[in-house]
Every structure is written in structure tokens, then in C-alpha cells.
Image (cartoon, helix red, strand yellow):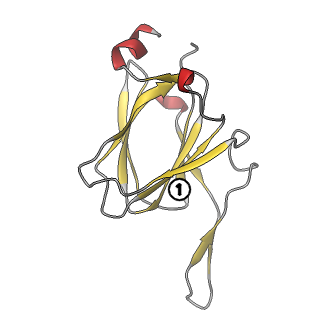
Amino acid sequence: MKTNSIEDVYEIKIPKIVSPEGMGSLSFVENEIIPFTIKRVYYLYDVPENGERGGHAHKDLSQVLFALNGSFDLLIDDGFNSKVITLSSPNVGFFLPKGIWREMNNFSKDSVCLVLASKSYDEQDYIRDYKDFKKSL
């Protein structure tokens, strides 16, 4: 597996259109904004405030994550360096290339995480054990 660095993880801002009448905001995602063709969209919700998600890396799949509501912390790890990013804005996401370990925790009440993925679901693409992830580098 070709490994990526946490330096390859970057912020993606999508447009935010604020209603001039004060009636809320609208944001949208188009393939021109995302660095891959979107093959799958899913979202995480009803995660308990002390819950944890993720805990894996992908061999070939890349993703962009957004906090549509609330906030959560995203730990990224390339096997050598790690960093925690707090996602808390519905129009600011983070691109995660393949080969990056990710863990999500510290979910706020009623948080919703939207995930845009470059591939359809394939269990064989997951590395679910951190020791196996380190061995694959």
C-alpha cells in the first residue's frame, strides 16, 4: 500500500450561501469541489457523546468528512505522525487520502458526520487493526 502523510490531509471549503432575508444558509457539494468522483455518501448520527467511530484505515478509498451538525474530533495518523482536527462547521470538510488511520470521538450532542467516499463499500479495503496498519507501511 502506498502510504500518505498527515500532510496530505487538507481542508475543503464548500460554498455557503446565506439568505439575505435571514432565513438560513445553503451549502452544496459538486464533483468539481471534491478531489475524486463521489461513489458513496453516508452519514453518522445518534453517536453517543462518549462514542467512538472510525478506528481504521483504507487501502484504496479516499474520503471527505463534514460535521453537518454539532462537532467531533478527528484523529489522523500516518503511522509516524498524528494530529487531532476538530470538525464543527457544515461547510468545512477534510480530505483523507487512502492509507491514513482515522478515529473520531468527542461527538457533541446531536452531531452528524457526512462522509463522501471515492469507492463503494468493500470490506477488503479496510485495515481495522492498528498493528496491521503499522505493518503495512
Q: Residue at x 38, y 60 (%)?
A: 111
* Closer-to-camera residue (67/5): 67
Say which quarter of the image contains residue 59: top right
Q: Dot 1, how many residues are within 10 Å of its Cα: few (below 14), some (14-19), or many (20+)?
A: some
Q: Amino acid at mark 1?
A: Val
Q: Is residue 43 above or below residue 80?
A: below
> Farthest residue in the left direction?
50
| Residue 63 seen in the figure | yes
| Residue 100 seen in the figure | no
Q: Is residue 61 above or below residue 11?
A: above
Q: Is residue 120 shown left or right of residue 107?
A: right
* Residue position marked by numbered label 1 in the rendering: 92
Say which quarter of the image contains residue 79: top left
> Farthest residue in the right direction?
32
> Farthest residue in the bottom direction?
21
Q: In the image, residue 125 lies at what x, y percent? A: 56, 23
User: Which SS class for mark 1?
Assistant: strand
Total tally of numbered discs in the picture? 1
* Closer-to-camera residue (121/64): 121
* Closer-to-camera residue (109/34): 109
Q: Is residue 11 above or below residue 128?
A: below
Q: Is residue 35 shown left or right of residue 115?
A: right
Q: Residue at x 30, y 63 (%)?
A: 109
Q: In the image, residue 61 lies at what x, y percent? A: 60, 29
Q: In the image, residue 55 lies at what x, y percent? A: 37, 31
Q: Is residue 77 shown left or right of residue 65?
A: left
Q: Residue at x 50, y 24 (%)?
A: 126
Q: Residue at x 74, y 49 (%)?
A: 31
Which quadrant of the figure contains the N terminus?
Answer: top right
Q: Is residue 38 above or below residue 61?
A: below
Q: In the image, residue 71 lies at what x, y percent? A: 37, 57
